[in-house]
Amino acid sequence: MSDFFYAAATSLLLSFLLTPLLVRFLRRRRVLDEGGHRKIHKGFIPSMGGIIIFLSFLLATLLWEPIEAVLHRRFELAALILVFFAGIRDDIEPLRPMHKLVVQIIAAGMVVIAGDIRISSFYGLWGIEELPMWLSYCGSIAFVIFVTNAFNLIDGLDGLAGTLAVFSFSFLCVWFYGVGNDSEAMRTACMIGAVLGFLYYNWQPASLFMGDTGSLVIGFMLSVSTLSFIRLNGSLPDVSYYKFHAILSAGLAVVLLPVFDTIRVFLLRLRQRRSPFLPDKQHVHHVILHLVQTHAKAVRLMIVGYLVIAGLIFWACKYLSDDLLLLSIIAFCIGVNALIKRIVNRSYKKERKKKSPVTG
């Protein structure tokens, strides 16, 4: 266990010490994110903090993980490097959506096909066990791309994406360590430290944003680690203490908040006859911020809510099957969306009443 702690401490220290250097460099080069329009922040703040997250993670991994394990996961690291450079390019000058998608398909394909990290079974859901090879590949690649971009979209409040990542990777790290997968535990520990060191500078008022460089790297790593979690959980014997019987639901719980928010926003935009890829302020974090007014309260509310809901799902996954639990999760998400809509409508009605002139 000490090696995992030292690995996390190494990436944390690197991230904490290198971030101020990057901030000064970006300010001198005027690589700044301007507030206004759909942005919540005001003024000019450096972006591309993901450079430090990636470098801290990579250096700590190479330092503490055995070379055999690094070589075994070489396709994953190569794909992560590809995503990293695509994120830098997107932060400097936005990539066309199709170009970004092509890069993500290549990176996901390297992990799923070359690295053989994929969902190979539905584990009895709807009576389906082993998946055809083509469906396993296509479904796993789609999962990696969707979760990567969903995490990118959740990065809208100071500290939100980073805090969410720390909790998700912490759960995975403890679980991987418990089942004896030291390689996965080491990688998640390095990512925890790298994000924690960055978070010190990302809490409001943030002095640095992670940018697409950070959110894409973290989202990609989270999606791949979740695939490994699902596959490894499915191979555990039923008597194992770490076994989640609702295997797919447990994997969904790890990434539930960004997945729920992305699906919700896409459906809202389609209902409004707008492109689902056009940015706006309909994300859950925008709604919560509108209601509570401060970044800190909004982030705390979202993280606490997510931890409670994910915790309940993980507890239920120990005893229920995917057939029942997945339907329950979908029904719950529909209910939460309806509640959010009702609260927002009430809030806007009150604002309109305050602004309307008094007649009589």
Image (cartoon, grey):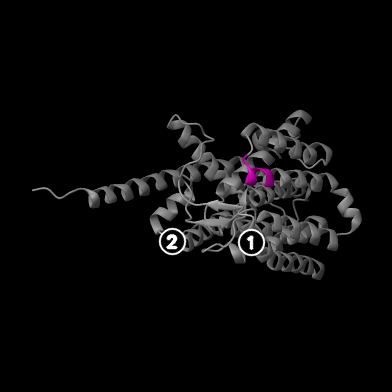
Seen in the image, is 13 located left or right of residue 68?
A: left
- Is residue 179 visible to us here? no
Asked which secondary structure carries label 2, the reply is: loop
Determine crowd level at label 2: few under 14, some 14-19, many 20+ residues with C-alpha closer than 10 A: few
Q: Position of residue 346 (x, y in %)?
A: 31, 48
| Front: mark 1 or 2 | 1
Q: Residue furthest right?
A: 68
Which residue is painted at 65% across and 49% down in the image? Answer: 250
What span is in magenta? 88-94
Asked which secondary structure carries label 1, the reply is: helix
> Residue 23 shows which numbered tag?
1
Seen in the image, is 347 located left or right of residue 253?
A: left
Q: Which corner quadrant of the image does residue 179 belong to?
A: bottom right
Q: Position of residue 312 (x, y in %)?
A: 56, 56
- Is residue 79 visible to us here? yes
Seen in the image, is 279 located left or right of residue 15?
A: left
Which residue is painted at 28% across and 51% down in the image? Answer: 351
> Which quadrant is the N terminus positioned in?
bottom right
Q: Position of residue 170 (x, y in %)?
A: 68, 61
Which residue position is annotated with label 2? 294
Which residue is painted at 68% across and 43% down in the image? Answer: 89
